[in-house]
Image (tube, rainbow, N blue to C red):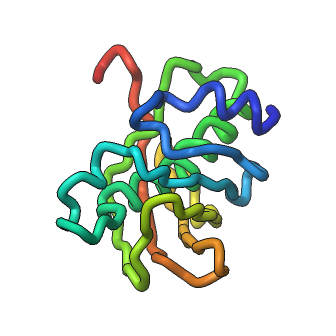
């Protein structure tokens, strides 16, 4: 499965899609990028006169690039698996080191810790354009049937 095919299968759309490009996705992990354009609605009022990307959105970006894309890839390897399942983040432990500002591009890389019984656990790291570590952590998700959501 190509990165373009995986990108098309991501269960998100604007304004909640935080993936511009997937560089690679395989059984070991993924990498991709996203630019937080200044017109995104959450910059208004977060923080007044000093807009930064909320931490929850940074976690979501890491989950989309480093979790959901990998889940789609790994599920595609199992021809007996139902293809109407999506990855749902269920837990995360993330440390933040630097803020992300409007018009800033970030790159996310994930490393699969394990994938079994429909559960994916990955180590995920985000860097800014200066190659400074923005945040890192562990994100876990489970596969859920779309009809049960």
Residue at figure coordinates x 51%, y 58% from the top left: 103
Residue at figure coordinates x 53%, y 43% from the top left: 68
Q: How many marks?
A: 0
Tell me, yes or no, if residue 124 can be seen here.
Answer: yes
Q: Position of residue 142 (x, y in %)?
A: 42, 43
> Of 127 and 78, which appears nearest the observer?
127
Q: Is residue 108 above or below residue 116?
A: below
Q: Position of residue 48 (x, y in %)?
A: 18, 66
Question: Horizontal placement of 27 versus 57: left or right?
Answer: right
- Extreme-right residue of the structure: 2
> Of 67 and 148, which appears nearest the observer?
67
Question: Horizontal placement of 101 versus 50: left or right?
Answer: right
Q: Position of residue 2 (x, y in %)?
A: 81, 34
When asked about the image quadrant of residue 101, the answer is bottom left
When asked about the image quadrant of residue 14, the answer is top left
Name the image quarter holding the C terminus.
Answer: top left
- Extreme-front residue of the structure: 49
Residue at figure coordinates x 72%, y 23% from the top left: 79
Name the image quarter holding the N terminus.
Answer: top right
Q: Is residue 43 above or below residue 135?
A: above
Q: Position of residue 97 (x, y in %)?
A: 42, 85
Question: Horizontal placement of 62 versus 113: left or right?
Answer: left
Tell me, yes or no, if residue 116 can be seen here.
Answer: no
Q: Is residue 40 above or below residue 45?
A: above
Q: Is residue 3 above or below residue 82?
A: below
Residue at figure coordinates x 66%, y 21% from the top left: 80
When asked about the image quadrant of residue 5, the answer is top right
> Of 123 and 64, which appears nearest the observer?
64
């Amino acid at each position: 499965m190509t990165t373009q095919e995986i990108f098309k299968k991501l269960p998100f759309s604007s304004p909640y899609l935080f993936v511009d490009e997937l560089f690679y996705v395989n059984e070991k992990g993924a990498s991709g990028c996203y630019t937080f354009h200044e017109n995104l609605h959450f910059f208004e009022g977060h923080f007044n006169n000093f807009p930064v990307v909320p931490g929850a959105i940074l976690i979501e970006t890491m989950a989309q690039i480093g979790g959901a894309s990998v889940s789609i890839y790994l599920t595609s390897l199992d021809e007996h698996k139902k293809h109407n399942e999506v990855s749902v983040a269920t837990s995360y432990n993330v440390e933040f080191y630097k803020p992300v500002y409007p018009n800033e591009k970030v790159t996310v890389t994930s490393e699969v810790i394990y994938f079994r019984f429909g559960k994916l656990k990955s180590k995920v790291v985000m860097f800014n354009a200066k190659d400074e570590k923005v945040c890192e952590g562990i994100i876990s998700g489970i596969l859920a049937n779309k009809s049960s959501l």
